[in-house]
Image: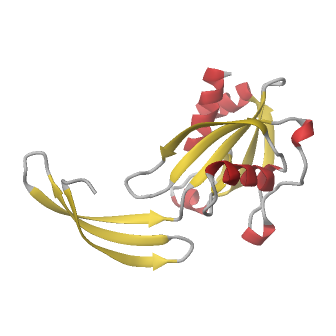
Amino acid sequence: MDERIKLIGIETLSKAWGTLTRATLDYRRLDGTWLTQSREVYDHGNAAAILLFDPARRTVLLTRQYRYPVSLNGDPAWLIEACAGLLDGDDKLVGVMREALEETGHQPRDVQFLFDAYMSPGSLTERLSLFVGHYDADTKIAAGGGLESEGEEIELLEMSLDDAMAMVRDGRIIDAKTIMLLQWVALNR
């Protein structure tokens, strides 16, 4: 840990799907004074996301599913997103390929790792690994739609890259990982 940080203690507040803890730490400010801070941290593991892109048709395959926390903020909870999921201890490439197949039914090819990102580093431990992969009619090998055993009900949405970017601009796509992936493809393909 950084020499400016002294961990005083960690208290587990909840342990269910993930773990919510409260950490108490001493933080040495730049002026040399010490400040005691308390931070709540949620850990449900690391995740990966992949944008499925068909370069021949310039289309993307996105998902739509219910996200309860979004409704708490007063926004429509049926989010349009890139395929994503928790790694569950797997390597990030293995995990993202599993999620692509479960959610979309596609086994993408030419998969490229782009970068890792923390989406909310002030309160979440989750590191998200972002990928892009190609899809077409030949990569469809399963039904997709998510795992019923995990309560998933995932709708697939295929659209042009231009239409997806318009949805970012007008606020119909508000998921950060999806915006980052769409912008990457728009800039680099």
Q: Which of 4 and 59 is in front in this view?
A: 4
Q: In which quarter of the image is the N terminus?
A: bottom left
Which corner quadrant of the image does residue 66 belong to?
Answer: bottom right
Q: Quadrant of the C terminus?
A: top right
Residue 72, given in percent of the width and then of the height, sits at: 53, 61
| Whether residue 174 is visible | no
Which residue is painted at 55% across and 49% down in the image?
128
Q: Which of 66 and 51 is in front in this view?
A: 51
> With respect to residue 160, does 1 lie above or below?
below
Which corner quadrant of the image does residue 173 belong to?
Answer: top right
Residue 21, given in percent of the width and then of the height, sits at: 39, 71
Which residue is painted at 61% across and 34% down in the image?
168
> With respect to residue 18, does 78 lie above or below?
above
Q: Which of 51 and 154 is in front in this view?
A: 51
Numbered-mark total: 0
Which residue is painted at 69% across and 52% down in the image?
94
Which corner quadrant of the image does residue 9 belong to?
Answer: bottom left
Side of 140 where 44 appears, left or right: left
Task: Tell me which colouring the rendered structure shows.
Answer: secondary structure
Residue 53, given in percent of the width and then of the height, sits at: 75, 33
Residue 30, given in percent of the width and then of the height, sits at: 12, 45
| Whether residue 148 is visible | yes
Side of 101 where 124 appears, left or right: left
> With respect to residue 145, does 178 lie above or below?
above
Side of 177 where 82 appears, left or right: right
Which residue is painted at 11% across and 58% down in the image?
34
